Amino acid sequence: NAGVTQTPKFQVLKTGQSMTLQCAQDMNHNSMYWYRQDPGMGLRLIYYSASEGTTDKGEVPNGYNVSRLNKREFSLRLESAAPSQTSVYFCASTGGGGYTFGSGTRLTVV
Amino acid sequence: ELKVEQNPLFLSMQEGKNYTIYCNYSTTSDRLYWYRQDPGKSLESLFVLLSNGAVKQEGRLMASLDTKARLSTLHITAAVHDLSATYFCAVGSNNAGNMLTFGGGTRLMVKP
């Protein structure tokens, strides 16, 4: 099915561990985004990639890095996980019209 | 910096009643999106509003956009239990990033 695919769906990390969240879209969209959603809150932008080869910080970039591997894939890396990064992470993409969101990655850092 | 505020944050209503959710934003934009989120799920697109005065309706939901007032509304008509969810508005930026800034969400509970 066309859309945005995120892996993994669930992850538990220990403080200090690292991991990469993967996101891929098959709609030939130029722009991709990583958001985090904390309980009872709206989504906050971590990083975005307006087009292949570019990345920029969003509202809450500290503790994260991203890679726009190609037009399809945009990964989010936590180098040294902290409990404050416990959240649900959503990847999204757009070709200039509507936005398509992935199903999310629920991350717990203990 | 773009700020987006929704109110109310929580809404409990009886089936059959009408109500409106408000979305105010702080800087100029002509792109406004409404999403629905069920618990533990992703965001489902409801409406895309792309011009001043835009009005869109789907079933019991109607959304409107006033870019001069920087205000969008989501009106619920004759609410039913199936509308229980959290509703988010999001405003599109006018820069090259095309990013969305989200409101805090309105948690709607419709009681029989």
Image (tube, coloured by chain):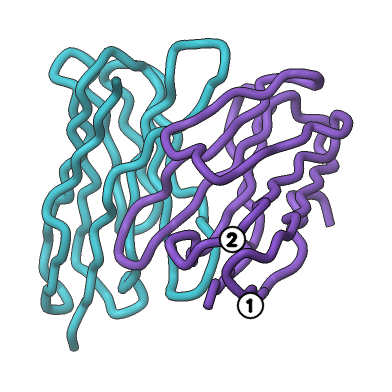
Chain colours: A purple, B cyan
Viewer-nearest residue: B5 or A27: B5
Question: Residue at the spot x=63%, y=56% of the render?
Answer: A80
* Residue B81, horizontal then vertical, whole percent: 29, 80
* Residue A26, horizontal then vertical, whole percent: 85, 42
Q: Is residue A95 left or right of residue B17?
A: right
Residue at the extreme bottom of the image, as rendered: B112
Question: Residue at the spot x=25%, y=35% of the render?
Answer: B4
Q: Quadrant of residue A11?
A: bottom right
Viewer-nearest residue: A104 or A18: A18
Q: Quadrant of residue A93?
A: top right
Could you tell me how many numbered marks the image carries?
2
- Label 2 resides on the chain identified as A
> What mark, if any, has residue A81 been given in the picture?
2
Question: Residue at the spot x=40%, y=23% of the render?
Answer: B31
Q: Quadrant of residue B91?
A: top left
Image quarter (top left, top right, bottom left or bottom right) of the C terminus of chain B: bottom left
**Figure check: B50 above or below A61:** above
Q: Is residue A44 left or right of residue A77?
A: left
* Residue B69, horizontal then vertical, whole percent: 13, 19
Mark in front: 2 vs 1: 2
Crowd around label 1: few <14 · some 14–19 · many ≥20 (10 Å): few
Q: Is residue A13 left or right of residue B32?
A: right
Residue at mark 2 to residue at mark 1: CA–CA distance: 10 Å
Q: Secondary structure at mark 1?
A: strand
The amino acid type found where label 1 is placed reads Val
The amino acid type found where label 2 is placed reads Ala
Q: Is residue B4 left or right of residue B34?
A: left
Tell me which label, 2 or 1, sits earlier in the chain.
1
| Same-chain status of marks 2 and 1 | yes
**Residue on which disc 1 sits:** A12
